[in-house]
Amino acid sequence: MNHTVSIQDTGFVTHDVLQIKTDRPANFEFTPGQATEVAVLKDGYSNKKRPFTFTSLPSDGFLQFTIKIYPDHNGVTDKIQTLEQGDQLEISDAWGAISYKGPGTFIAGGAGVTPFISIFKDLADRNQLDENKLLFANKRERDIILDSKFNQWLGADFVNILSEEHNPKHAHGRIDKEFLKKNLKDKDKYVYICGPVPMINSVKEDLLEIGVEKEQIITEDL
């Protein structure tokens, strides 16, 4: 089932990541970590649907999306950054493979962190952040989405690694076996991974090699 929502507010949270707030249809339900298919109700775009994750809470009276913009692509996200209050989107019922099953380590690449935002908001609301950790891979520090919020939620259990920038505050390189050995919260707990498919495949292979059980690994690709 599809629903029409109106934009209430927009604003950038990094140089290329936009947050959009919309009204919420009556009786619309989702769980933290789920996504929806979104279409911009403008000429030439209403049939171009793209998946975006809810970054609001199920208890909020509004919907929120945190979206990486790709202006060079001249596509849907480029159009989204031009939208204003009152413009409309069409969304589908919620879906998604990432859901919280218990404490563990969350591993995100770039915009792959978005399914985890609602999950961490929900855990913070319920005072259940303990025993959870986030490993976040980006190119540069300015790419880190909700840096201050994750620091507030997780403190030392928020670990960043940058591939294209040396910064004394963060690790440098990519998430590999040695990085996982050093930073994995507990290999007997769940590991949640979201990001580009090559990253997921590589991290999953490394996790299996260091002894994480396949059943403990939960993934969602971009």
Image: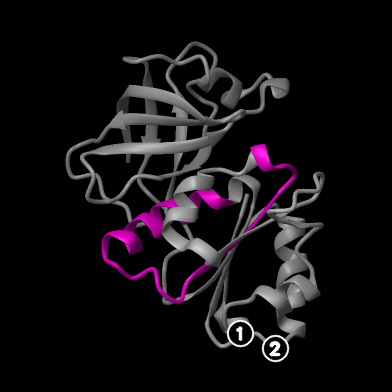
C-alpha separation, residue under disc 2 versus residue under disc 1: 7 Å
Q: Where is residue 207? Give x, y as percent.
A: 71, 78
- The disc placed on residue 211 is 2
Q: Amino acid at mark 1?
A: Lys
Name the outermost residue toward the front: 168
Q: Nearer the viewer, residue 169 or 93?
A: 169
In the image, the segment drawn in magenta is: 113-142
Q: How is the image coloured?
A: one colour
Q: Under tag 2, what secondary structure?
A: loop
Name the outermost residue toward the left: 26
* Label pair 2/1, CB-CB below 8 angstroms: yes
Q: Where is residue 180? Give x, y as percent.
A: 71, 74
Q: Is residue 98 above or below residue 81?
A: below
Q: Where is residue 68? Give x, y as percent.
A: 59, 34
Quickly name the residue at label 1. 187
The residue at 59%/51% (across/down) is: 112
Number of residues whose C-alpha sits closer than 10 Å to that of mark 1, classed few (under 14), some (14–19) or many (20 or more): some
Among the two numbered marks 2 and 1 on one chain, the one whose residue lies closer to the N terminus: 1
The residue at 37%/15% (across/down) is: 87
Q: Nearer the viewer, residue 11 or 27?
A: 11
The residue at 55%/27% (across/down) is: 48
Q: In this rendering, would 136 be left or right of 93?
A: right
| Quadrant of the rendered image containing residue 218 | bottom right
Q: Is residue 5 above or below residue 98?
A: above
